[in-house]
Amino acid sequence: MSIEVHELVVFPGPDGSAGNPLGVVLHGGTVDAADRQRVAAALNYSETVFVDDPASGAIQIFTPATELPFAGHPTVGTAWLLAREHAPIAALRPPAGTVGVRYEPDVTWVTARPEWTPVFDFRQLPSAADVESHPQPDRGHVYVWAWLDEKAGTVRSRSFPVDLGINEDEATGAAAIALVGLLGRRLEIHQGVGSRLIANPTGDGAVELGGRVAAVRTFAFDGR
């Protein structure tokens, strides 16, 4: 079984570095539902997306260990890829619900609800240096953060979703949505080794999440 996989990087910094790798199978129907978790584990991206219907935006999202009802960088990346390979879309439809989509020249935006995100163990630390030096947890879903500039709303963060099969996530859109839900304000998040995420409250309980996306390669995966 040969599967065409698009590898993207989502939320790279202004210089194009860093960002979170993502695998997207645009022809999701080529992979049986029962095989998707195994394929995602073999690909070993933090998340892999299977697009079941480009027109309606129906998708499934898997980490190497489990399916997610919603995730941030997979929806931003998939929305960008569909616009490039098919046509711009107004919404994606993962199991959690309808995710609004809009496009700017350099930023792709999705709108989702904080209650769709996993339960994060948010830990605010005194400084960015404390975030940098935080040890790798051996369990849980820990997200450490500190203000870089509280007045400007800039944050330094790292994410350790160990229970999802990921030791450290380079850029975690769902956590950005959840943190904006908690704080109720716009944030620019500097995560991992250089990723940038922007998230804004919409005023109706939802959060808009945006960032850059870039294509890395398209390749055939043998399905094993």
Image: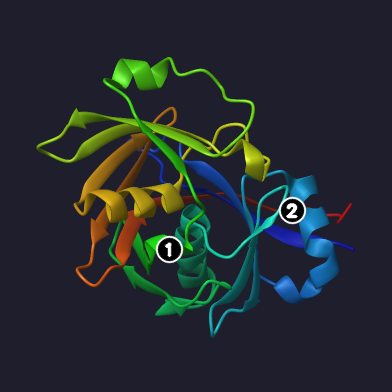
Q: Left or right: where does residue 62 sit relative to residue 154?
A: right
**Residue drawn at the location 25% of the way across and 43% of the way down:** 188
Q: Amino acid at mark 1?
A: Glu
Q: Regarding mark 1 in the picture, which secondary structure is present there?
A: helix
Q: Give how far across and how far down residue 71 sits, in percent.
A: 51, 58
**Residue drawn at the location 43% of the way across and 51% of the way down:** 173
Q: Give how far across and how far down residue 20 sits, in percent.
A: 51, 42
**Residue drawn at the location 27% of the way across and 21% of the way down:** 126
Please tell me whether mark 1 or mark 2 is closer to you in this view. Answer: 1
Q: Give how far across and how far down residue 49 sits, in percent.
A: 63, 62
Q: Amino acid at mark 2?
A: Ala
* Measured Cα–Cα span from mark 1 to mark 2: 25 Å
Q: Nearer the viewer, residue 200 or 211?
A: 200
- Residue at the limit of the structure toward the bottom, as seen here: 56
**Residue drawn at the location 21% of the way across and 54% of the way down:** 184
The residue that mark 2 highlights is 40
Q: Give how far across and how far down residue 224 sits, in percent.
A: 89, 51
Above/below status of 132 relative to 69: above
Instruction: First in sequence, mark 1 or 2: give its number.
Output: 2
Can residue 56 be seen here? The reply is yes
Write down the quadrant of residue 143 in the picture. Answer: top left
Mark 1 closeness class: few <14, some 14–19, many ≥20 residues within 10 Å = some
Its colouring scheme is: rainbow
Disc sitting over residue 115 in the figure? 1
Q: Regarding mark 2 in the picture, which secondary structure is present there?
A: helix
**Do labels 1 and 2 touch, CB within 8 Å?**
no
